Amino acid sequence: MAEKTVATAEVQQPQTTESTRHHERYMAPPVDIYETRDGLVVVADMPGVAKEALEVRVDNHVLTIRGQARHAVPAEVTYREYEFVNLFRQFELNEQVDQQRITADVTCGVLTVHLPKAEAAKPRQIEVRVD
């Protein structure tokens, strides 16, 4: 049950926006995809993304992962050597994934999405009869 990554494009700003304004940039987070007996498990690195700033959704057989990274220190920045980039990735799902039972959790900046197999796609034992 292989999945393929949907091509992502740079987020385009409306033409009414001035070109001098900063536009949002997105980076594809690195992921590992594992296949188990019960389905697929997608593990994505989402550093700096709080649960409230994380969006995981399925629409028209496309799994979308989007996160807005923020610095955890609630103070004014005096000096910063790096800037967080928002994270965005999409995967096309096939009909073997039970989209109604997808679950996700995030722990310490690692998102884990469980994509269970549909009952029709699960392996089953065939009984052999003797006549």
Image: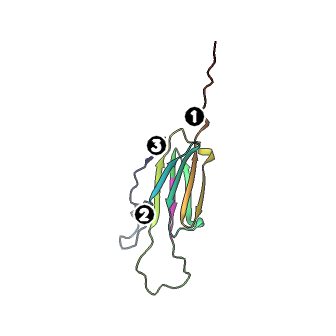
Q: Secondary structure at mark 2?
A: strand
Label 1 sits on what residue type?
Answer: Pro
Q: Which residue is denoted by mark 1 in the rendering?
A: 123
Q: Which residue is denoted by mark 3 in the rendering?
A: 2
Return the mark for residue 26: 2
Residue 14: image quadrant is bottom left
Going from N to C along the chain, the mark reached first, 2 or 3, is 3
Q: Which residues are magenta?
A: 64-69
Label 2 sits on what residue type?
Answer: Tyr
Marks 1/3: CA distance? 16 Å
Dominant SS type (magenta): strand
Q: Is residue 52 magenta?
A: no
Going from N to C along the chain, the mark reached first, 1 or 3, is 3
Which colour style is shown? Answer: rainbow
Marks 2/1: CA distance? 38 Å
Q: What residue is at 50 percent from the left and 68 percent from the top?
A: 47
Classify 10 Å Cα crowding around label 2: few (below 14), some (14-19), many (20 and above): some
Q: Is residue 103 above or below residue 61?
A: below
